[in-house]
Image (tube, rainbow, N blue to C red):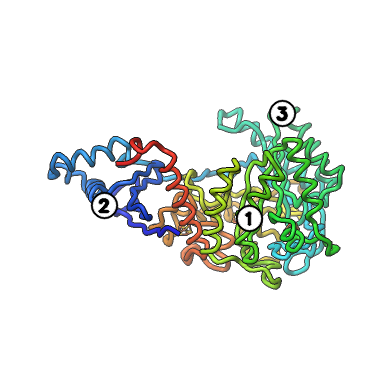
Amino acid sequence: MESVECDEINRDVLPPPELFVLRDGQGPMLYAPLGRLVARANEPAIALALAYAKDPGSFENMDADEQAVVNMFKERGFFEPRSFPHHEVGFKPAQVTLFPTNRCNLRCSYCYAYGGEGGKNGEPLVTMSADVAKRAVDLVAHNAKERADNGENVHNFLVSIHGNGEPFCAYDLIKEIIWYGRDLAEKLGIPAVFNAATNGVLSEEQLEFVVANFDSVNISFDGLPQFQDANRPQASGKGSFAMVDRTMKRLSEAKVDFGIRTTVTADMVEYMPQIVEFVADNYPGIEQLHFEPVWECGRCVKSSCSMPSSEAFIESYLASVKIADERGLRLVFSGARHDMIVDTFCKVSSGSFTVTPLGDVTACYEVSYRSDARSERFFFGHYDYELGDFVFDQKKLDELSKLNVHNIAFCNDCFCRWHCAGDCAAKVLDGISLEEHSGSVRCEINRALTLNQIQRKLDWRPKDDETV
Ligand code: SF4
Ligand code: SF4
Ligand code: SF4
């Protein structure tokens, strides 16, 4: 694995761009994340660039050769002022994620939500009321229409079906949601987009409904039959591979836009390259394969599955990237995304509008029960059954808006600051304040895999265009 040393020039003195010096086996690179710029250079050239960035007046004291080096960086935009990213302010969502039910037909050994068992504290198994779902769809559809009419960059409303259980265990409700959303889209004259995340254990009828009605689908699948059957068994204890395989083959054949999310445990980490081959062989046309190391929470705490070491995950991921490239497959890990310039890891700080089966509104997919201590931070509204409408807590929204990387001192010196943006708040801020954020074991993975993306970006460009 390449080392990720990271030097940084003084941010207090220099307005953005921030410049970082990254080093790998080939030597140093100058990296300006906000300008999406990277260049390999030798150490003296890097030193000149940093000297100039710290004090542009030093240019006058450089000789002609040194000035020529600085000019090469200058011409490529390395010293241009850049703005920091800022997230949206004001809560007017044009998208909603609905958790139709916490029931589940699987009992995955690492499920963060104890799917099918009502969360950690065994709360009742429920299905969302149709009134709640329809009002949520109403709200985002009308917001989208209003925002589009006001000339904002909003062209549709989005309804995502997800869950702290398997959403298709509430199939009748899902049908109602889709039909309601379609009618509303027609009435308002703004398109509706429907996404679903499912475990893929669907009846024939449900599968055909998905093919006919969803714009994109995400399937949770553990990559190889033996891991799927072991880690993601049905509630009856039987394996689930055969059913998920049928679902993915049908989606593939029907050319539905779908991706696979594979949760990687310590036992399966070395098989990641094989998983890439298996997926490419069996499910052609798949949009992306998402590898995520399991996070030890929920059912995982008591089951035998554990998180892979950072080193093992990085090594296996990098081996997988090569194969994925050859097979034309897009490989994804949530913490490495050098192409995104953001100040939050997810939409948590702008009040991602996610509705639980009971009608509570949470900003975080992983926090969906009132009895979860983290709900104090992430719940910011609920459906008022008497009023027949959602009520939101502006103070909570204001607090949530602080969950961004501008406020995370720990990330200040990290070159992934504007990509990873402090990582998943539910994971790194469990029981602590923002000031106490001190990263996690994921930081090593985030940095190594982001560095790899930057290296690959350099490799892909013509040398004379990028190398100083
Ligand atoms: S399918 Fe999803 S909700 Fe159900 S047990 Fe597995 S991880 Fe949990
Ligand atoms: S905070 Fe983490 S778990 Fe919650 S929605 Fe964001 S990425 Fe997902
Ligand atoms: S959470 Fe870790 S990897 Fe992410 S920006 Fe902060 S320090 Fe960097």
Measuring from the top left, give residue 440's x and y in whole percent.
51, 65
Tag of residue 364: 1
Q: Amino acid at mark 3?
A: Leu
Measuring from the top left, give residue 448's x and y in whole percent.
46, 56
Q: Amino acid at mark 2?
A: Glu
Rounded to the nearest angstrom, the CA distance separating label 2 from label 1 is 44 Å
Measuring from the top left, give residue 40's x and y in whole percent.
33, 46
Indicate the quadrant containing the N terminus: top left, top right, bottom left or bottom right.
Answer: bottom left
Q: Amino acid at mark 1?
A: Cys
Tag of residue 188: 3
Horizontally, residue 87 falls left or right of residue 72, namely right
Element marked by disc 2: helix
Q: Earlier in the sequence, mark 1 or mark 3?
A: 3
Q: Earlier in the sequence, mark 2 or mark 3?
A: 2
Residue denoted by label 2: 43
- At 42% from the left and 60% from the top, the residue drawn is 409
Disc 3 CB within 8 Å of nearest ligand 2 atom = no
Tell me if I can see residue 384 in this picture. Answer: no
Disc 1 CB within 8 Å of nearest ligand 2 atom = yes
Horizontally, residue 163 falls left or right of residue 426, namely right
358 or 247, which lies in front? 247
